[in-house]
Image: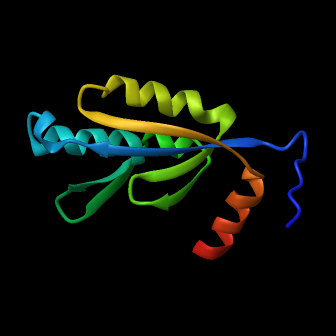
Amino acid sequence: MRIEIRRGKTSAVIISFDTHSQNFESASERNKFFHGLYGWEQTVPGNSRVYKYWRSGVLDGVPHVKISDSVFAVAMENMKKVEEYFQEWEDKIEWEMFEVMMEFDKLLNKNRKISE
């Protein structure tokens, strides 16, 4: 097997996190963490209609690839935004970041094709 190291490729970070339910004051607070990370759809009933609004989360503004539940990859240049959000919740969650050398744009495009 031949391993080739290419210079100038975008490095990425794989982020894995775990929430500790007992550290949250309520299920509502835990939901607030997930809503802030992933975003959420708010539904407001009106007189004759239902209004739906998308409320953005941190990952809405960060190109990312979901790898598994509570595991995703982001380009290195976007890692700080996610890290800052996790630091706000550091007493309630645990997280790890693993730097990997990969063509993040290629991975992102491949993921988009799969989800279409």
Question: Where residue 75 appears, x then y in whole percent?
Answer: 67, 42
> Which scheme is used to colour this image of the protein?
rainbow
Which quarter of the figure has residue 91? top left
- Residue shown at 67% from the left, 36% from the top: 76
Q: Nearer the viewer, residue 57 or 50?
A: 57
Question: Where residue 111 appears, x then y in whole percent?
Answer: 64, 66
Which quarter of the figure has residue 88? top left
From this view, report whether residue 22 is shown above or below residue 85: below
Residue 28, visible in the rendered structure: yes
- Residue shown at 53% from the left, 29% from the top: 81
Residue 11 horizontal side relative to residue 41, left or right: right
Q: Nearer the viewer, residue 64 or 94?
A: 94
Q: State the quadrant of the C terminus.
A: bottom right
Residue 86 horizontal side relative to residue 102, left or right: left
- Residue shown at 43% from the left, 43% from the top: 56
Tag count: 0
Question: Where residue 15 appears, x then y in whole percent?
Answer: 50, 44
Q: State the quadrant of the N terminus.
A: bottom right
From this view, report whether residue 113 is shown above or below residue 25: below
Residue 59 horizontal side relative to residue 48, left or right: right
Which residue, as the protein is rendered here, is positioned at the far front? 1
Q: Nearer the viewer, residue 62 or 45?
A: 62
- Residue shown at 58% from the left, 33% from the top: 79
From this view, report whether residue 71 is shown above or below residue 62: below
Question: Where residue 62 appears, x then y in whole percent?
Answer: 58, 42
Residue 55, visible in the rendered structure: no
